[in-house]
């Protein structure tokens, strides 16, 4: 279970955070009502609690959905060093840490930089990128650029919707350029990281370093460039970086969720530069590509799954590749919890709600309305904080269904009901789950409510 949690968590938080905090956490025990983790010291415990506790609880309960609500508890490893370290002067140590953190990070970055690369994810490669009609143009352009950086299309501008492989292609270009020539200076960042770096450099009087860093690259990859919209000083600085690199024949690759012309609040001179080279779009994957992607992923992860099942998934999930991956993982998780093999029935079970959700016929309002009608409790009362028994019950049911049907996060659900915190929502949801298990008639009620929501909604 812990391995699975880590895997999902890894997708959900950034790699640096993951590597700095999660690597030395050990699962100790999984009891009736909680998972106990052991960490090295109090500092790490505090950090993980403040940063990831909520996420881990959510993932944990998602995975063990059939086993009742589980909480999370941290224990600190018994260790003489720890005792001494933290008995002494806890506060000053913390403060010192805080102060030096920025300069430390800066040093790490500079250090990495002197080696010539930074920030590339070595899991995103050309050879695990599956090519289909929807992405063949962007893929071919990326390979051409990777084989002759600065020589063919400059800049290369890749755009497309979320989860379609833009980031994957950018890392693949970077990895490939470095593989061909490890002396090349390659840098990948999001446009937000570029902005942050700029702000920090301005603050710390390090603009010389900033400029020499960005302007001496052989390949600069900036992801999600649309986020520089409205940020004037970033645009100004990026404009000069761009010119310098371009004039020196160095390669620039940009990605965005939309074509250059449609990015509002960006200076004209930048937009026109985005269009200088080649603009390549990535479309939603077609059916064949979706099947190919799924079978490749299953193969890479050693998952046993038949062709029919893969095709069924590809027919059902037609949005983006991240969704495909996510659903494949849900299915694998469910199969392993139930100790069942993966067949169409199991997949249907996992999908029943997803299918409806993708058809966009179900939304929050619909769910709340149906519950309110069924229990004859006004929507106003349901989202109030009244504690009258029948009101509270209808509220819990609505929370359960929002979670069950739409996979809303606990905190989002709390928001709908007047800002209840996520633990309240979690307890409500698990209360309903428990009641359903204990009372067949209640379970039937809930099922018929669900049918109602999913079926008559158009
Ligand atoms: P974007 O940056 O466009 O939002 P990503 O590059 O992050 O999308 O892709 C989302 C996920 O889907 C990643 O895990 C990526 O590896 C995977 N992916 C996307 N396109 C492909 C593809 N053609 N072949 C294999 N995996 C893909
Ligand atoms: Mg991306």
Image (tube, helix red, strand yellow):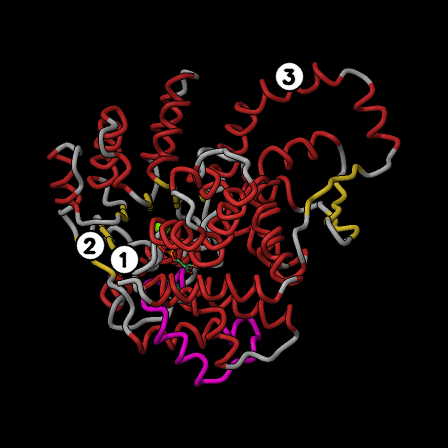
Rendering coords of residue 63 (x, y %): 60, 59
Q: Name the residue located 29 percent from the left edge and 53 percent from the top edge.
A: 149
Please give the count of numbered marks on the rendered protein.
Answer: 3
Name the quadrant containing residue 231.
Answer: top left
Of callouts 1 and 3, the N-terminal one: 3
Mark before the other along the chain sequence, 1 or 2 = 1
- Where in the figure is residue 194, as x and y percent of width and height? 35, 34
Q: Which residues are magenta?
A: 298-323
Residue 294 shown left or right of residue 277 in the figure: right
Residue 212 in the image: above or below residue 134? above
Q: Name the quarter where the C terminus is drawn.
A: bottom left
- Residue at far right of view: 80
Residue 421 x %, y %: 54, 35
Q: Are marks 1 and 3 in contact (CB under 8 Å)?
A: no
Element carrying mark 3: helix
Q: Residue at x 30, y 76 (%)?
A: 287
User: Residue beneath label 1, please?
Assistant: 145
Of discs 2 and 3, which sits in the foreground?
A: 3
Instruction: Using the numbered discs, state the Cα–Cα distance from disc 1 to disc 3 in whole angstroms.
Output: 46 Å
Please say whether residue 13 is visible from this viewpoint: no
Q: Which residue is mark 3?
A: 95
Decide: marks 1, 2 in contact (CB < 8 A)?
yes
Q: Secondary structure at mark 2?
A: loop
Image point (40%, 16%), residue name: 205
């Amino acid at each position: 279970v812990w391995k699975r949690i880590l895997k999902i968590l890894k997708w959900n938080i950034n790699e640096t955070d993951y590597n700095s905090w999660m690597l030395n956490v050990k699962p100790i025990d999984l009891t009736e009502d909680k998972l106990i983790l052991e960490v090295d010291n109090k500092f790490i415990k505090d950090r993980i609690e403040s940063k990831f506790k909520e996420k881990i609880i959510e993932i944990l309960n998602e995975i063990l959905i059939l086993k009742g609500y589980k909480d999370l508890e941290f224990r600190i490893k018994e260790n003489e060093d720890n005792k001494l370290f933290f008995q002494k002067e806890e506060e000053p140590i913390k403060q010192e840490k805080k102060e030096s953190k920025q300069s430390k990070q800066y040093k790490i970055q500079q250090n990495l930089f002197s080696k010539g690369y930074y920030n590339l994810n070595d899991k995103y490669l050309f050879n695990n990128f599956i090519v289909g009609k929807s992405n063949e143009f962007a893929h071919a352009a990326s390979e051409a650029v990777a084989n002759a950086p600065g020589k063919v299309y400059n800049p290369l501008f890749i755009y497309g919707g979320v989860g379609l492989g833009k980031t994957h292609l950018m890392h693949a270009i970077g990895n490939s350029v470095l593989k061909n020539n490890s002396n090349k200076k390659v840098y990948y960042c999001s446009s937000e990281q570029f902005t942050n770096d700029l702000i920090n450099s301005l603050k710390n009087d390090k603009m010389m370093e900033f400029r020499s860093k960005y302007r001496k690259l052989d390949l600069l990859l900036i992801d999600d460039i649309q986020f520089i919209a409205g940020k004037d000083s970033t645009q100004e600085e990026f404009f000069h970086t761009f010119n310098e690199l371009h004039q020196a024949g160095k390669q620039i690759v940009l990605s965005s969720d939309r074509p250059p012309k449609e990015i509002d609040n960006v200076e004209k001179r930048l937009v026109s530069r985005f269009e200088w080279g080649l603009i390549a779009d990535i479309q939603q994957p077609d059916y064949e590509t979706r099947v190919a992607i799924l079978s490749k992923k299953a193969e890479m992860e050693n998952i046993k799954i038949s062709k029919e099942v893969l095709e069924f998934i590809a027919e059902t999930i037609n949005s983006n590749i991240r969704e495909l991956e996510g659903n494949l993982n849900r299915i694998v998780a469910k199969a392993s919890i139930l100790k069942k093999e993966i067949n169409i029935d199991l997949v249907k079970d996992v999908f029943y709600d997803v299918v409806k959700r993708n058809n966009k016929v179900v939304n929050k309002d619909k769910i709340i309305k149906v519950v309110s009608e069924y229990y004859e409790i006004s929507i106003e009362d349901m989202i109030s904080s009244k504690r009258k028994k029948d009101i509270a019950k209808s509220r819990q049911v609505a929370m359960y269904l929002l979670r069950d049907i739409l996979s809303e996060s606990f905190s989002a659900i709390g928001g709908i009901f007047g800002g209840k915190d996520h633990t309240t929502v979690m307890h409500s949801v698990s209360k309903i789950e428990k009641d359903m298990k204990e009372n067949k008639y209640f379970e039937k009620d809930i099922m018929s409510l669900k049918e109602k929501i999913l079926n008559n909604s158009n």
